[in-house]
Amino acid sequence: MESRLYKIVLLFYLFYSPVLLSRETRDFVYYNQATYDHYLREEWDQLIKVAHEALNSGYDFYYLRARLGIAFYEKGIYTSAIIHFKKALIFNSTEPAMLEYLYYAYILASRHPDAAYLFHNHQEIFGNIRLDYQPKFIDGLGFEGTYKWSNHMTEEGVEIGNVLYGRIGFQHNLGGRLNLIHFAGLLSMAITDKYYDENYYICYPYHFYQFDYYAKLNLLLGTGWVVSPAFHFTGVDAVSSHYADIYFGLGIRKRLGRISIGFNYGYADIYDKTIKQYVPEIVYYPLGNNKLYLTGTAIFSTGDADQQVYMGSAGVRVFPVTWIEGFFAGGKSQYVSLFEGALIYNNPDYLQSRTGCSLTQYLNSKTSLQFFYVAEKKEQTVSGDHYTQHVFSLGLNLKF
């Protein structure tokens, strides 16, 4: 009887002890070796699963975070990769490989201010690493040309002609926490006044000119917070009038994993009208990168124009170097400022909707072309006539 019992216990031990032992020995050695094996075999999904199990079991160490970050990086989920690279650097803050991975994860997640700040704080290490992109004082240069087809005859006999607009812009890295974006542009619009004198029309053509300058400073506060003061000046020169429009804005935004939230306050003096704007916005990256993104923005205006505008857009990477985006803005508005004051509508006609699409094509890692089409539906202020303006823009952007 004792011999039979002994055999049963022995068989139980031989069959089940490996299972019990494997459960009991899932310690630092196990998780370190398992993640290392998955890393060597580039089994990213299995690595992520085992690494999360280790973290949930209370194990956290440099190589675990490093391998987990690399797994997310290789899968293109840069928002998650950033989290784990930063955790790895807590264990070893000067590891060149992790700094380089984090740097490129910031770039690929469109978090260039964070990348510049990281580069500035570790120049002695990055100086020994060959990088495809390095922050410079002149970080970027852009050109844009716009043609707006806007033929429209009002009841007062004024023909609003086509619009030509061109601008040049720069992006500057000012060291670590600061970068500056600014541009200057010139607009020309043909207008013809028509008067009926007995049996024929008298046409009086003239041009409407506008010069504008815009500047926005991005200040990185750390932990993903960015504060952005902005300024936009517009000088208008017409035959019978000369005036200036001014916009001041202050924005703040925060990156929270796959979501970016922000709020912007704007104050504008446009055509003798005082407008205050309160603008919450949100951006969602479903894939954890900029291959797909959705945005939503609301504009609440007070002052001489009490109005609401709602905007949304969706962008997707359709080819490795090609992005397309569709966007829409609705809500009857007058003298509204969009995109943190970068675009100001100082025409007194009402903007009813703004719908369009864009195509971005990268020629190489530092050169891209952009094409925009926008349909602006408007209402003439005095007569109430409705008309549509068609906007075509072509831009060239260079990174240095």
Image (tube, rainbow, N blue to C red):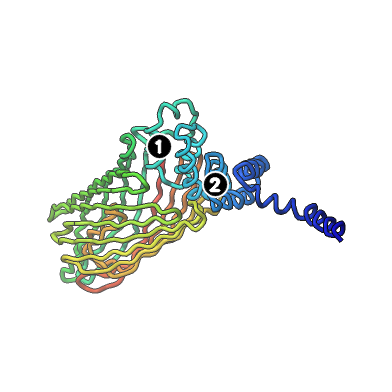
Q: Is residue 90 above or below residue 200?
A: above
Q: Name the residue rendered at 49%, 51% in the picture.
A: 289
Residue 123's spot in the image, x, y percent?
40, 29
Q: Name the residue rendered at 29%, 54% in the picture.
A: 340
As rendered, which of 240 and 316 lies closer to the eye?
316
CB within 8 Å, label 2 to label 1 = no
* Mark 2 → mark 1, Cα distance in angstroms: 27 Å
In the image, taking residue 333 as reference, residue 143 lies left or right, namely right
Q: Residue furthest bottom?
A: 384
- Residue hosting label 2: 59
Q: Name the residue rendered at 70%, 53% in the picture.
A: 20
As rendered, which of 63 and 127 lies closer to the eye?
63
In the image, taking residue 121 as reference, residue 22 lies left or right, namely right
Quadrant where the N terminus sits is bottom right
What secondary structure is found at the residue carrying circle 1? helix
Residue 160's spot in the image, x, y percent?
26, 62
- Residue hosting label 1: 118
What mark, if any, has residue 171 been given in the picture?
none
